[in-house]
Image (cartoon, grey):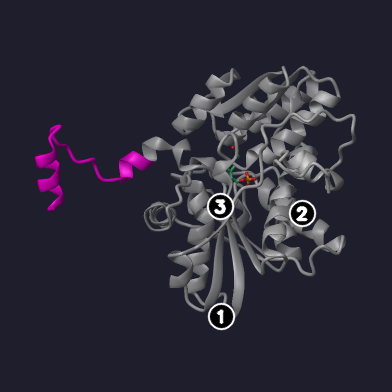
């Protein structure tokens, strides 16, 4: 463990003993990580059985999603290798993180996004951080195919989760969960899109166990949106559709690794409907005080679904759900589902009357 632990130095410095870095590796960091593990006060107690539910709230990372953990590693290693440009395909969050960290390292960031299917906050980020932002007439899978072809031929570093350093960085979320709980949880639930994060968490949990820091590893619970659930059906989906645009992916790059993670951990992969996702998305904000983006709610929706089916039995167990991105990423969705604000003149009397005081 790094000696400079406080103030928080970012995930590379804090977990340098667990990552493929040396003193020569530049730390391109926005002090990501160290995100809160929040106990559930409403949804957890309402679940059947004796589950202890926690939320790993990744929305408070510097660009508002878990992608910052992987991106600090990918861009630091690219900088170490002398790279001048990076490229990624993205449903939005990867592009925001790639743009921020590449800019910080003085590199050009090129991002390919599916036209019309990236939430407004994420688009605002890529543009503001100065990425060369290209909207492609196709979906995420098309964008990733193009990025693979281009980065194979030209001197541009691919920073999707096919980049192994992204995975190294994202393992740190599993380390933090174990550090916070003093042991690995019994279950860890995640939304699954390109399938990098579930794979990275699993590798991270295994690393901690192999080093004797934890005794056990969790069962990994992966949840996909029903209209974009290739890992559940076992078939690529040519036209993925879901309101959770972050996970609108039909042919995940880390398909095999994610299947292995689920198998090795004795986990499950299931689909949740858009209705289930949106109901929990609203409940997390309105009952827990945690605003996450729709895709993030898939982890909690999945846990609620399988809990209702009796999956956890009467076991008393710790369940961690990762809330992958901040609610502000997708303001259009939030406003479209919420009640309209009330209106009043600028007079105390009128407002007091409205409130019934
Ligand atoms: N949740 C959010 C908010 C995401 O942005 C993503 C992936 C996931 C979950 C799924 O993680 O792909 O590792 O299985 N977003 C990518 C992107 C695809 O381009 O931002 P995964």
Q: Indicate if the residue with disc 3 has its beta carbon within 8 Å of ligand 1.
A: no
Residue segment shown in magenta? 334-357
Magenta-drawn stretch contains 38: no
* Residue 109, above or below 207: above
The residue that disc 1 covers is: 313
The residue that disc 2 covers is: 204
- Label 1 vs label 3: CA separation? 26 Å
Coordinates of residue 107 in the picture (x, y in percent): 72, 18
Q: Which of marks 1 and 3 is in front?
A: 1
The residue that disc 3 covers is: 229
Magenta-drawn stretch contains 351: yes
Q: Can residue 217 be seen in this view?
A: yes
Residue closer to the observer: 227 or 85: 85
Q: Residues within 10 Å of mark 2 (few under 14, many from 20)?
A: many
Q: Which residue is drawn at 71% across and 54% down?
A: 174
Q: Residue at x 60, y 33 (%)?
A: 90
- Label 1 vs label 2: CA separation? 27 Å
């Amino acid at each position: 463990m790094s000696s400079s632990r406080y103030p928080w130095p970012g995930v590379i410095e804090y977990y340098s003993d667990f990552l493929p870095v040396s003193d020569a590796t530049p730390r391109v960091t926005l002090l990501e990580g160290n995100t809160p593990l929040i106990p559930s006060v409403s949804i957890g107690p309402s679940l059947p059985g004796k589950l202890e539910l926690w939320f790993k709230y990744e929305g408070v990372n510097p660009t508002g999603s878990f992608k910052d953990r992987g991106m600090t590693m990918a861009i630091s290693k690219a900088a170490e290798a002398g790279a001048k440009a990076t490229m990624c395909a993205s449903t939005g969050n990867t592009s925001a993180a790639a743009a921020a960290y590449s800019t910080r390292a003085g590199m050009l960031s090129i991002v390919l996004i599916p036209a019309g299917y990236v939430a407004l906050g994420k688009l605002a980020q890529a543009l503001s951080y100065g990425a060369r932002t290209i909207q492609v007439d196709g979906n995420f899978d098309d964008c990733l195919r193009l990025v693979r072809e281009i980065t194979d031929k030209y001197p541009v570093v691919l920073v999707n989760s096919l980049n192994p350093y992204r995975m190294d960085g994202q393992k740190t979320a599993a380390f933090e969960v174990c550090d916070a709980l003093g042991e690995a949880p019994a279950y860890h639930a995640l939304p699954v899109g390109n399938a990098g994060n579930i794979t990275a968490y699993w590798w991270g949990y295994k690393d901690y166990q192999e080093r004797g820091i934890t005794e056990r590893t969790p069962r990994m619970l992966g949840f996909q949106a029903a209209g974009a659930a290739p890992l559940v059906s076992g078939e690529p989906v040519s036209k993925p559709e879901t309101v959770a645009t972050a996970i609108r992916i039909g042919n995940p790059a880390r398909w095999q690794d994610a299947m292995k993670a689920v198998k090795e951990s004795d986990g499950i992969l299931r689909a949740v409907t858009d209705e289930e996702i949106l109901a929990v998305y609203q409940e997390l904000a309105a009952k827990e005080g945690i605003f996450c983006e729709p895709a993030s709610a898939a982890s909690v929706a999945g846990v609620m679904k399988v809990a209702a089916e009796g999956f956890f039995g009467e076991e008393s167990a710790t369940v961690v759900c990762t809330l992958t991105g901040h609610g502000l990423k997708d303001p259009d969705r939030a406003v479209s589902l919420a009640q309209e604000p009330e209106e009043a003149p600028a007079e105390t009397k009128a407002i007091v009357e409205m409130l019934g005081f």
